[in-house]
Image (spheres, rainbow, N blue to C red):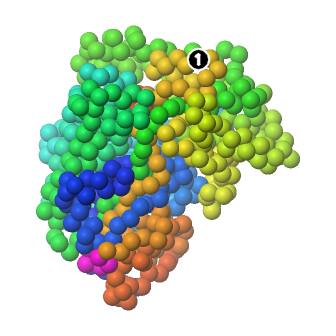
Amino acid sequence: MTQSNNRVMVFGMDGATFDIMQPLLDAGRLPNLARLIARGASGTLDSSVPELSPPAWTSFMTGVTPGAHGVNDFFGPVEAGSYETRFFNASYRRRPPLWSLLSARGRRSCVLNVPFTFPPDPINGVMVSGMDTPSLESAFVHPSEFREELDRVTGGYRLERVERRLSRRAVGRYARSIEEITENRFRAAAHLLGRESWDLFVVVFESTDRAQHNFWKFRDPAHPEYNARDHARYGELVERAYEDLDRRLGELLALVPEDVTLCVMSDHGFGPLYKGVRLEHWLAREGYLRRAAAPRAPRPPALRERLGALLPGPARRLARALLGRRGGDALPPGLDAFAMAGTQVFPVGGYGNLVINLQGRQPQGVVPESEYEPLRARLIAALEGLRDPDTGARLIERVWRREEVYPHCLAQTPDIIIRWSPGYYCVGEQELGFLGIRPAPDALTTAHRWSGNHLPNGVLMLAGPDIVPGAGFDEAAIIDVAPTLMALLGEPVPSHMDGRVLTEALSADFLARHPPRTADYDLDIGETRPFSEAESACINERLKDLGYL
């Protein structure tokens, strides 16, 4: 197989779903996406398990599952048998990303705002890290000398912010902020398209994700917080985010030659979120988890928010970080709230996947190895049986043993993997505290800060000279994107990738000229580079603001 002359542009729409997109397409409100679908292949793209941005985008770029690349949440234990949790970043990725593989083959890439690309990879090309960038003071641009140019063309590159609890009067302000961040990213992308010679160009916009998390309740009459007045004012905010990205896509396409292959994709889909589920509370109630005698009390946000409202932006961010940093608050929510000597299983990360406190593996393990599998079986049955006390609906759609989901598992992968039912998502006890949500003491479900949340059904569209018009996909998954892009570029697909080439979308002529084949790549993935305490404090604040902690 020889290199093709193809160039590929990836346009990421974080959280995009055909559930929103298709009615807009039918109404003629997404003309650029409609033209791409008409001349190319399209279909649903199954996300990672779990369907969170860190594992999903990392699966996109590596072509392997979270069990193999190791980034399975926003934070978690980074070593097997450790109770210490860290925020994940790109350095914890245990497989090389697409652009590093291409660099090894002499190809050039531009990568802009892809989540979980900090610190930036030293690629042949340009990289601007995504949402895990700690601050504007961090080294998030490669090469570093491009930073000044980036600020110049964008009017000052920005990191997104959001108010922790989005009051009614703040909705319009946040909607404008989403649009401003999109414009900021667009200016950077348009500049790079004209500045650089590239084989692969990747840009991700997160506006669809942010709008759906926060504004879904305004469009959904079934949501507990829906009301007619807010619907009249804000009911189109989600749809407007899609329309805005469709317009941006058209403007970027005007800057590239017609023979460029285009990939439009999302990392996961979206749907309504009606209730939070107190998983930690349930584990304690059922005797699986024991809380520490005096867990650190969550601090109410009132003082920080009142002071912050009086300060300008930079000072407000500094004050929030400093007021929030006490007793290790620069670290993610840890396991210090649990008495491990009396705990059989505990949740890790923000998604609620479970680790068994195993003797010989965890420092204070209590579960004998002979009880590991029987305990997993009991937990899976119990979790699958959890019901909404108000409606009887299942709270959890699916529960797996880790080896059932991931063909390859790093040792620190959680033992039990959960998929929440549509409309439900876990909420931690510390999170309830700092959000000021106070459920009844023994309530299993409660309010959640978000009104929309991730579902596994993302989107994928391919269009270009070597794509079959009107083709669909045979159960395409996010791990299939990287090998497919490698094949389109005429490069051998790494043998370690879990995904496959989506040959059903590629023309017979292209496959005859460039039949896919595999090869071993020997790339150094480098050492892990944990966030510093100051960087962790910044990440902690941003993820709390965005609702992920």
Specify whether residue 50 is in view.
Answer: yes
Q: Tell me the residue at 29%/22% (across/down).
A: 168
Q: Is residue 468 magenta?
A: yes
Lateral position of residue 50 relative to residue 251, left or right: right
Please tell me which residue lies in front, 511 or 318. 511
Q: Secondary structure at mark 1?
A: loop
- In the rendered image, residue 504, in percent from the top left (x then y), is placed at 41, 77
Q: Is residue 498 magenta?
A: no
Q: Number of labelled discs?
A: 1
- In the rendered image, residue 71, in percent from the top left (x then y), is placed at 52, 49
Lateral position of residue 255 relative to residue 437, left or right: left
Lateral position of residue 113 relative to residue 118, left or right: left
Please tell me which residue lies in front, 190 or 459. 459
Q: Tell me the residue at 64%/23% (across/down).
A: 337
Report the magenta stretch's main SS: loop
**Stretch of the chain drawn in magenta:** 463-469
- In the rendered image, residue 211, in percent from the top left (x then y), is placed at 31, 39
- In the rendered image, residue 519, in percent from the top left (x then y), is placed at 50, 77
Q: Tell me the residue at 31%/56% (across/down).
A: 22
Residue 546 lies in quadrant: top left
Please tell me which residue lies in front, 245 or 523. 245
Residue picked out by circle 1: 440
Check disc 1 and give the amino acid type: Ala
| Viewport quadrant of the N terminus | bottom left
Specify whether residue 80 is in view.
Answer: no
- Mark 1 Cα-neighbour bin, 10 Å: few <14, some 14–19, many ≥20: few
Lateral position of residue 339 relative to residue 215, left or right: right
Q: Tell me the residue at 17%/48% (across/down).
A: 187
Residue 294 lies in quadrant: top right
